[in-house]
Image (cartoon, rainbow, N blue to C red):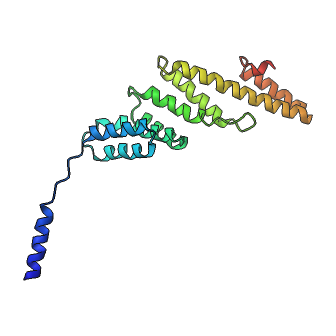
């Protein structure tokens, strides 16, 4: 009997404990933003994801998706950031921040541009994504930067073609060298590299 009474009393007292304060998504968002400013990207990501999970009002979701992507970008985890930015664009293609997300998609590749003696596939991808930004969002605030970075990508691709052309020329593979030189002039006529 005493044992049952003790268990009942323990259960009742446990129920009388302090209630947890209700989750405040606005305050948590402010905390996450402060963590971003301090470049505590992983902690900020945890805070943003907590808002995504716990906030009853889902009006934050688009902004949070973008901020989660930004945390990965800040950590230079460009593959993870790319996945998040693309997910944002898939779910929110007409959002006011869609041009920013597209710009960041391009920047994820641009930040990993290889040297001219390496496979230029990432450079091609960056160029394609910058051109997509210019096509889809022609009056975007990112238009000028995208144009500048596109030109850099094109110049790098031209430099790669010239590098390969010179490689073939040095090996005595003149037919292959001529093919690369023609490709350089055809694909990158505006290139400073092509004028060498």
Above or below 6: residue 130:
above
- Looking at the rendered image, the quarter that the C terminus falls into is top right
Q: Is residue 106 left or right of residue 41?
A: right
Considering every residue shown, the one lying at the far bottom of the view is 1
Considering every residue shown, the one lying at the far front of the view is 38
- Tell me residue 38's x, y (percent): 43, 38
Q: Is residue 167 left or right of residue 54?
A: right
- Tell me residue 94's x, y (percent): 39, 27
Q: Which residue: 64% across, 32% down?
A: 124
Q: Which residue: 41% across, 28% down?
A: 97
Q: Pick the residue in front: 157 or 75.
A: 75
What is the count of numbered marks? 0
Q: Is residue 88 left or right of residue 2?
A: right
Above or below 2: residue 46:
above
Above or below 39: residue 140:
above
Q: Pick the residue in front: 184 or 21.
A: 21
Give residue 96's quadrant in the image: top left
Q: Which residue: 54% across, 40% down?
A: 76
- Tell me residue 113's x, y (percent): 64, 35
Give residue 131's quadrant in the image: top right
Q: Which residue: 41% across, 46% down?
A: 43
- Tell me residue 156's x, y (percent): 70, 28
């Amino acid at each position: 009997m005493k044992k049952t009474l003790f268990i009942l009393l323990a259960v009742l007292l446990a129920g009388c404990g302090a209630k947890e304060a209700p989750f405040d998504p606005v305050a948590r968002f402010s905390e996450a933003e402060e963590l971003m400013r301090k470049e505590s990207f992983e902690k900020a990501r945890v805070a943003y994801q907590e808002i995504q999970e716990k906030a009853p009002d889902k009006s934050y979701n688009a902004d949070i998706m973008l901020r989660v992507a930004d945390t990965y970008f800040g950590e230079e985890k460009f593959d993870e950031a790319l996945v998040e930015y693309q997910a944002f664009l898939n779910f929110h293609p007409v959002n006011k921040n869609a041009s920013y997300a597209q710009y960041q998609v391009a920047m994820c590749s641009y930040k990993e541009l290889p040297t001219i003696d390496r496979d230029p596939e990432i450079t091609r991808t960056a160029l394609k994504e910058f051109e997509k930004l210019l096509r889809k969002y022609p009056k975007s605030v990112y238009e000028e930067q995208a144009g500048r970075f596109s030109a850099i990508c094109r110049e790098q691709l031209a430099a790669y073609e010239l590098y390969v052309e010179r490689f073939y020329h040095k090996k005595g593979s003149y037919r292959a060298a001529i093919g690369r030189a023609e490709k350089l002039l055809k694909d990158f006529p505006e290139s400073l590299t092509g004028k060498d």
